Amino acid sequence: MDVLAMNPTLEPVQLIGPDGTPQPSDRFDPSMLDDRLPSLYVTMVATRELDEEFVNLQRQGQLALFPSCRGQEAAQVGAAAALRDSDWLFPQYRELGVFLVRGIDPAGIGLMWRGAGHGGYGLVERAVAPMCIPIGTHALHATGAAMASNWLHDGSVTVAFIGDGATSEGDVHEALNLAAVEQAPCIFYVQNNGWAISVPLSEQLHAPSIAHKGIGYGMPGIRVDGNDIVACYAVMTEAAERARRGGGPTLIEAVTYRMLPHTTSDDDRRYRTPEEVAAWSALDPIDRCRRYLEKSGLWNIGLQDQAQQKAAELRTRLRDAVFDAPDPSALELFDHVFTEPTAELRAQRELLAHELGAR
């Protein structure tokens, strides 16, 4: 492989400017998503509204914790929309927009954050692995699944959705290296939202960018404007097509921003300034998409009504599912360990049942 072809530029791929104006590109067509963009706009709005409902429920004591994805809707919806429904996705814990693209019921996600469900139901049926709270470990799972796709010759790709902080973890290094060595059809999609909790990107790496790390593993790296839904879609489409042709993995760095604290337990005012947040707020991905739709003649007032209606339905479904939901039985912990429980596991279950019954 030509080393120069793997060396990314620092300037992220951008197909829609902040004011909604299409940006010229020799590599991608800014209108490539026009037929689907109105419906994806609806999904982005619904993602933000649902995200707000999750935060509200946590503040009302109905959820244990929640990590907001506000500001990252374009990065998530654009990337997920570029994939086949059969491509396996390996999320971390902030991929609400990805889940909505796949049609996953938010009720299952809500019950997981309440602690009333194990991993969220409705994911594996949509080729989405359970949410991964440990940082970066699921990158190895995605690599393994991609290697299996190679062996099965099924034409599938896998995507590991990771954050900038995960690129500082050994698991991610091992996953990138193994995927490259095996030429596995795996895409490492890094949502660089500027902060690994309170640690800025400048304290996480000395490379020019996260995308530049790809060259060290022998895979292409590319930076994309993560607030540009069309650019995210285009870059993911290219990487997926390359992987399906046997071209191996790709490292994508979507440059975006986390508008709210790391989780509902975090206070971001302790480590970033209001001026920084305001500057990124002016680059809002939903506003940018709407401006592009208006400039391209694809906008109509009914689209906003449709978005609000979908959002309201999802918010109601989430609230109805999680509000005062009962705790699961502790015995459920034993139900999904083995297809056929071992004698030791059965004995442990019986012991716990006895202890619970004695209370």
Image (tube, rainbow, N blue to C red):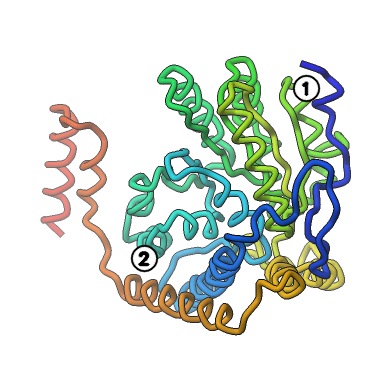
Say which amino acid is labelled 1: Gly
The answer to whether 320 is drawn above or below residue 222 in the figure is below
- The image shows residue 109 at horizontal and vertical percentages of 41, 60
Label 1 crowd (10 A; few <14 / some 14-19 / many >=20): some
Whole-percent x, y for residue 213 in the image: 78, 30
Quadrant of the image occupied by residue 290: bottom right
Can the viewer see residue 128? yes
Q: Is residue 343 left or right of residue 320?
A: left
Give the crowd class for mark 2: few <14, some 14-19, many >=20 residues within 10 Å: many
Q: Which residue is mark 2?
A: 107
Residue 331 picture location, percent across and down: 20, 49
Question: Relative to residue 213, is residue 122 drawn left or right?
Answer: left
Q: Quadrant of the C terminus?
A: bottom left
Residue type beneath disc 2:
Ala
From the viewer's perspective, tell me whether residue 249 is left or right of residue 103.
Answer: right
| Residue drawn at the location 55% of the way across and 52% of the way down | 81
